[in-house]
Image (tube, rainbow, N blue to C red):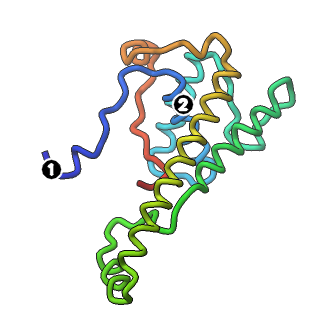
Amino acid sequence: MDDYESLVPDPPTRFGVGELRDAYVDVVTDEVDPRWMAHQRREYFDGLCGLFDLRLPTSRETVSRGPTQYVHVLLLNTVHSLRRTSSPWDGYLEAGGLLAQLRALGIGEAHEELAIELRTVVEMSRTKHRTVLDLLLRGLLGERAERVFTLAELEAAGIERAVPIRYLPD
């Protein structure tokens, strides 16, 4: 196993509200910023929605008037807010040069402390955003929110599990 394989979590084998939420975030992200394999993620999301018997808008243009339209808008707003939650260090794959320059300026240690503090706050915010999304989805689903599907049930329904590409940087 190479050094990076241990960082990749095993794909889920049970599919509940959390997996529906993650698929929804992926599809809404792809609506705004199409990425590689967007079509496969959309099919996976549509399949999960079918299993949960739920229709969700993935853009403002697809929000329908009705008893849940305001909740649907809040759902979309929450995904967009989650996508914006970041820190100045997101996106760096290798920051050795930056860290060396900060140390040379004499602010490396102070920077590291601030980076750790901000990273903690950002992760807490992302967690809270996901909690809000779960709450909204559970409200929309009602009793169906307790459904959990197995990989075999997905396969029987013809749903291919998409490998998510997370928009939110590590």
* 4 shown above or below 68: below
Task: Tell me which residue sits at (64%, 35%) in the image.
Answer: 132
Q: Secondary structure at mark 2?
A: helix
| Quarter of the N terminus within the rendering | top left
Q: Return the x and y of residue 91 as percentages of the image width and height.
A: 43, 64
Quarter where residue 25 is shown: top right
Instruction: Indicate the amino acid at tag 2.
Output: Phe
User: In the drawing, does residue 59 fall left or right of residue 120?
Assistant: right
| Quarter of the C terminus within the rendering | bottom left
Q: Residues under labels 2 and 1: Cα distance?
A: 31 Å
Q: Which residue is label 2 attached to?
A: 45
How many residues crowd around disc 1 within 10 Å: few (fewer than 14), some, or many (20 or more)?
A: few
Q: How many marks?
A: 2
How many residues crowd around disc 2 within 10 Å: few (fewer than 14), some, or many (20 or more)?
A: many
Q: Which residue is label 1 attached to?
A: 2
Quarter where residue 153 is shown: top left
